[in-house]
Image (cartoon, grey):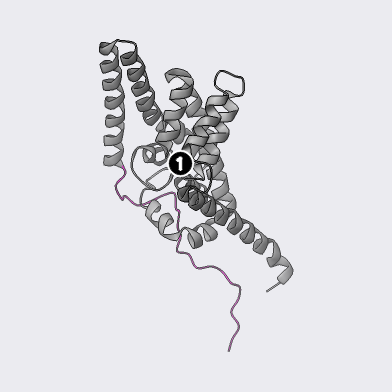
Amino acid sequence: MDKTASQPARRTLLLGGALLVGVIILFALGKLGIMPSEKALNTWMETVAGSPWGLPTIILVFCVAAFLGVPQFALIAAAVAVFGPWLGFAYAWIANMFSGSLAFWLGRLAGEQMFRRYAGATANRLSTFVGRNAFATSALIRNVPTGPAVMVNMAFGVSSAKYSNFALGMALGILPKIALIAFAGQSLFAAMKGNPGLAILAAFIAAAIYAAIALYARTRMGPKGQSVPLIRDNPVDTGPKQDD
């Protein structure tokens, strides 16, 4: 085998491995409480509430928090609490798109071999949720319990899914989750202002929207095979074999 020709491929594997290992280390440190906590991230957002830096800050917080294993519900709730139901809804949606896209492209850069090597069990489990097309799967998987969001999005990057289909599915799929929290936040604010009727209505709308989407997602996300392969079993070509 030509060693010179194999060097770019080897460097790509090493870079991909380093990226994936870094993601896993950050995730582990976040779960162990060594990295910034949810409270610290919320404080960052509160310091820029009402300023032009609000949106860039929440995007940064969502991107960092995704790799620390902070639950998306907590991040969205913080955005709604800091910026209000409507602005918080918009900011959380935009920040989710940035965060998910970052993980997607990191997965694509890392490559299938490295993702399979360092996240094998997770990757194989996630592969059962990859349905007949990237758009529908990317939309529905947001509303069913799977793995950490960062691993889900990286798995799409590793797959042959087109980014446009992934992004459009994510853009629509995250709306119910954000709407649930935003309407719930509106319900809380209405209750605090002495308007129980509006509070009950907002809470009911939030629960109905999320329940309907989640139920539909569960019925569609059964193991139907996959047209967007995550883990392929094709043997790796190691070049022509030499006769004994």
Residue behind mark 1? 70
User: Which residue occupies 41% across, 32% down?
Assistant: 174
Picture coordinates of residue 53 (x, y %)? 61, 24
Picture coordinates of residue 232 (x, y %)? 46, 60
Decide if residue 110 is in sight here. Answer: yes
As for residue 202 lying within the magenta part, the answer is no
Q: Which of the 4 image quadrants contains residue 182?
A: top left
Would you say 199 lies left or right of 107 here? left
Picture coordinates of residue 3 (x, y %)? 71, 71
Would you say 194 lies left or right of 178 here? left
Decide if residue 160 is in sight here. Answer: no
User: Which residue occupies 31% across, 50% down?
Assistant: 223
Magenta region, main secondary structure:
loop
Name the residue furthest right.
4
Picture coordinates of residue 77 (x, y %)? 41, 29
Q: Which of 198 and 172 is in front in this view?
A: 198
Q: Which of the 4 image quadrants contains residue 175?
A: top left
Which three-letter amino acid code belongs to the residue tagged 1? Val
Q: Which of 44 and 178 is in front in this view?
A: 44
User: Which residue occupies 41% across, 59% down?
Assistant: 121
Task: Count residues near mark 1 (Cα–Cα under 10 Å), then give few for <14, some for 14-19, many for 20+.
Answer: many
Name the residue furthest bottom.
244
Q: Is residue 88 above or below residue 195?
A: below
Magenta segment range?
Answer: 221-244
Q: Quadrant of the C terminus?
A: bottom right
